Amino acid sequence: MSALNINGRDHTVDTDPGTPILWVLRDTLGMSGTKFGCGAAQCGACTVHLDGEAIRSCVTPLSAAEGRKITTIEAATDGTDRVGAAVHAAWIKNDVAQCGYCQSGQIMSATAFLKSLPRGKQPAAAEIDSAMEGNICRCGTYARIRAAVADAARALA
Ligand code: FES
Ligand code: FES
């Protein structure tokens, strides 16, 4: 049995501790907002936060989450998190998503990035690109992602 804290709620799962967190979220707990892309830490579709840090849940075992806090897209964009709410609003304003498949991972990476900045700091475009470079978008929404992250940073200043 593994005890997990996901989005502020405690869960106990009877799953092999070596199972990637992604499959515990999606298959065991039915939280399908986190997506499977490559399964090899190369695309960012599966990004969640572990104690606030953006991680690739497809290659992070369940055992790594024991005693730590997992945050997924379901909580990051439910309006209860100031930074997540700003990112969500900026995504809508900039009409970022195309097919949408990569977008929960993009939002999780953007949220972790903005939380890592000193309050009020406005990141340069190159800093945004660097922070987001691990998240691939096959639809090529990169310019809108960059604009949305900058908008969110302004909203949070
Ligand atoms: S599915 Fe995890 S990085 Fe691609
Ligand atoms: S919006 Fe389609 S893959 Fe990014």
Image (cartoon, grey):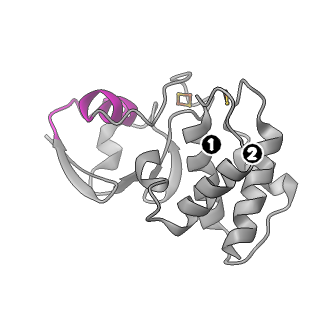
Q: Secondary structure at mark 1?
A: helix
Residue 95 image point, x, y percent: 72, 43
Quadrant showing the C terminus: bottom right
Query: What range is drawn magenta here?
Result: 13-29
Q: Is residue 72 visible?
A: no
Residue 70 placement, left or right of 13: right
Image point (85%, 61%), residue name: 124
Asked if the residue at tag 1 contacts the one at tag 2, i.e. Cβ–Cβ closer than 8 Å, the answer is yes
Residue 8 placement, left or right of 55: left
Question: 80 or 71, which is in the foreground?
Answer: 80
Q: Is mark 1 within 8 Å of ligand 2?
A: yes
Residue 110 image point, x, y percent: 64, 52
Q: Is residue 1 magenta?
A: no
Residue 27 image point, x, y percent: 29, 27
Residue 140 lies, with reference to residue 155, above or below; the image says above
Residue 120 lies, with reference to residue 23, above or below; the image says below
Label 2: which residue? Answer: 145
Q: Secondary structure at mark 2?
A: helix
Residue 154 image point, x, y percent: 75, 69
Residue 126 placement, left or right of 29: right
Q: Residues within 10 Å of mark 2 (few under 14, many from 20)?
A: many
Quadrant showing the N terminus: top left
Please, what is the three-letter code of the amino acid marked with disc 2? Ile
Residue 121 placement, left or right of 83: right
Question: 148 or 48, which is in the foreground?
Answer: 148
On residue 106, which mark appears? 1
CA distance separating discs 2 and 1: 8 Å
On residue 139, which mark appears? none
